[in-house]
Amino acid sequence: MDYSTLLNEEQLKPVTDTEGAVLVLAGAGSGKTRVLTYRIAYLIEKCGVSPYNILAITFTNKAAGEMKERIFNVTGQEGMWVMTFHSFCARVLRNDADKLGHNRNFSIYGEAESDRIITRILKENFPEDADKKKTIRWHISAAKSIAMTPEQYSARIKDRPDRDLITQVYAKYEEELAKNNAFDFDDLLLKTFLLFAMHKDVLEKYQDRFLYVHVDEFQDTNKIQFLLVKMLVRKYGNIFVVGDDDQSIYGWRGADVGNILNFKKDYPDCRIYKLERNYRSSGNILKTANKVIANNAGRMGKQLWTEKDDGIEVSYRSLGDDKTEADFVLEQIMNLVKNHGYRYSDFAILVRINSITRTFEEKMSSYGMPYKVIGGFKFYERKEIKDFIAYLRMAVNPADGESITRIINFPKRGIGEACVEALIRACSMRNISLYDGLMSLENLELSPAYTKKLAQFAALAKDLSEHKDDMPLDEYIKYVMDRVDFYSAYDMDDPEGRTKLENIDEFITSVHEFCADNPDVRLEEYLQTLSLLTDADETDEGNYITIATVHGVKGLEFRCVFIVGLEEGIFPSLRSDTTTADVEEERRIMYVAITRAQERLWLTNAGRRFRFGKWENNSVSRFVKESGLIAAARRMDERMVHHTVQQALRRDFAPKFTQSATAGKDISVFKEGVKVRHPKFGDGVVTEVNGENARIAFEKLGVKVLNLRLAPLTVIGE
């Protein structure tokens, strides 16, 4: 095989450098998987290395499977270990776990089993802290990722008020695992590390087998993974790692970018190769990426380039508010789909925080544009939103037993499955609804303990039902938020908990917006509209717009990308105690977002958003400023941006845009009083027109503000 014809010069050098330590800094879209595949093929074909002596570590089972297939297609050889860290460690422990006092037939507990153990420990020992399960689970995982016992980790978190709770549950959790002869996923790594450290004969067995060790996505390794690799290669020193320090974006789950930044210190004689030629993006997109990431001090330094031409200029737009931002983005998409031969599947809308997707989802639903959320659920399908809506449905329809059973123990009230089952049986015997049973607990002949637990929820259910008509809808929603105390269900110190609270706040914002257009709307009417807003359109053969967090699309690419919500506090998503490391990881996330784009890239922000119960005037993200695009945008669009902001401040409709998605569409027919039909929302009447936008009162949905050029509306009479 002639490798010089299969690889470019940058790729060929590390592939043929087979001895000692090699670090390949592989920029986005530079062909790192190709380099790894041919490096292994070169060892087998040109150096005579047996597949038995080769180990390749990846981060996902999918990547491992794809690499195995590629290697077989190139070499026709099998037999090497190509697997994830966890799979590697599980195989090692199956052979030698007995040396640590464990039975080799151990069970491997996934997240569900681990959660059940922690739930039981809390219930039996700390029932008042049952709602802290996820926080504790996160801390146990964090402790194991840095090889700390409960006692050691206790010292590390000495300033946390829940320090004792975390360490005591951690200790009891370890006892339970040992009793069940089980390892959790973090144990697979930790126990293998301990096995190698305590039993040199076992370590040497694997050192002598794996003469050549390869690690993909090295920037995403944590401390334990780094130490495992270091142990394996200590004897022969043949380590080949591929990664990109500029794409290290998983610090929140234990990844340590220092592993790749300090590789030279750990392996002083290593050779470092840079893959800087990008095969994915246009020149202008790469220039933007390079400008932004250059502001990170903690990087090894590389400059992406391409043989492609500069292509279309990267575009930046500052819009007056989030609705205007969404309309702008969707107009560009519709224009390119209808007039320039693009498909919906060519587009991705990337966000930093989940809650930003709501406005885009509702707009796409209104305009009949198919979409799919990657890296999470559609906004109204998220658990925390469904939980909130279930409280509202119960208030409107007390006979809704499904909603009651969903929320009867959320937030945690100590109402277990056995208690719920007893309530259901008692109500069934009397042929009454669960709500009626809750309102007459004294007649159900339940145990005093069950009655006491259920009485608390019964009082809440009665209160919410009685007050639903006592105040405007938006005020009632806030009342439910406080009365139920959703804040108690989520830990703001936990990234997942903070995200869920942000989503609930965005839901409250959506109700606020609906009430602004429908001042006298009742809760019953609002709930009726949700079925229309949340009814997902079927996609056509995968032809849908992707909307995703940046983390959700790492490794993917799209012809056209919009990075939206580029405002300080959103992207970068920073807390008040931000460190330099936090800022640099946020910048790496931005770099990953930019380098998903192949042909066209837009950066957008909104001048203001309604968040946390008030309008926020947001400053433009530092990353936009670093991109160098603000000055160009100001020269081009100063008048348009000023006009947009002024209209937003008057709470007017979104303005006209300079580019029209459907230039041939005659919107002059949409006048006040005209009857229209929407394929999803049904029939309605235009009540007001402002430029390209109109308020339309739909018979089933209520009032919606739609862009007349984008919305699939037809006139059905006057």
Image (spheres, rainbow, N blue to C red):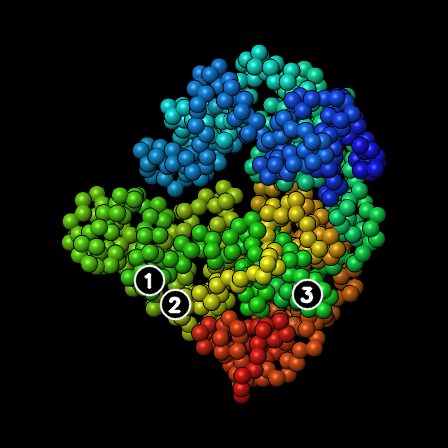
Q: Nearer the viewer, residue 218 or 469?
A: 218
Residue 699 in the figure: left or right of residue 320: left
Q: Is residue 78 above or below residue 208?
A: below
Q: Nearer the viewer, residue 664 or 468?
A: 664
Whichever of labels 1 and 3 marks the residue nearer the N terminus, that label is 3
At horizontal 65% and vertical 22% (from top left) the residue drawn is: 52
Work out how far the residue at label 2 is from the one at label 3, CA to CA, in angstroms.
Answer: 38 Å
Whichever of labels 1 and 2 marks the residue nearer the N terminus, that label is 1
Amino acid of disc 3: Val
At horizontal 45% and vertical 37% (from top left) the residue drawn is: 111
The residue carrying pointer 3 sits among few (fewer than 14), some (14 to 19) or many (20 or more) residues within 10 Å by Cα, namely some
Work out how far the residue at label 1 is from the one at label 3, CA to CA, in angstroms.
Answer: 44 Å
Q: Position of residue 332 (x, y in %)?
A: 68, 65
Amino acid of disc 1: Ala
- Residue farthest front in this picture: 76
Q: Nearer the viewer, residue 285 or 52?
A: 52
Q: Where, by quadrant of the figure, is residue 690 drawn? A: bottom right
Check disc 3 and report its element: helix, strand or loop. helix
Q: Where, by quadrant of the figure, is residue 528 drawn? A: bottom left
Q: Are marks 1 and 2 in contact (CB under 8 Å)?
A: yes
Q: Position of residue 228 (x, y in %)?
A: 60, 23
- Residue farthest top in this picture: 201
Check disc 2 and report its element: helix, strand or loop. helix
Q: Which residue is mark 1?
A: 395
Q: Which residue is mark 3?
A: 337
Amino acid of disc 2: Leu
Whichever of labels 2 and 3 marks the residue nearer the N terminus, that label is 3
Residue 681 in the figure: left or right of residue 330: left
Q: Which residue is mark 2?
A: 523
Work out how far the residue at label 1 is from the one at label 2, CA to CA, in angstroms.
Answer: 9 Å
Q: Are marks 1 and 3 in contact (CB under 8 Å)?
A: no
Quadrant for the N terminus in the image: top right
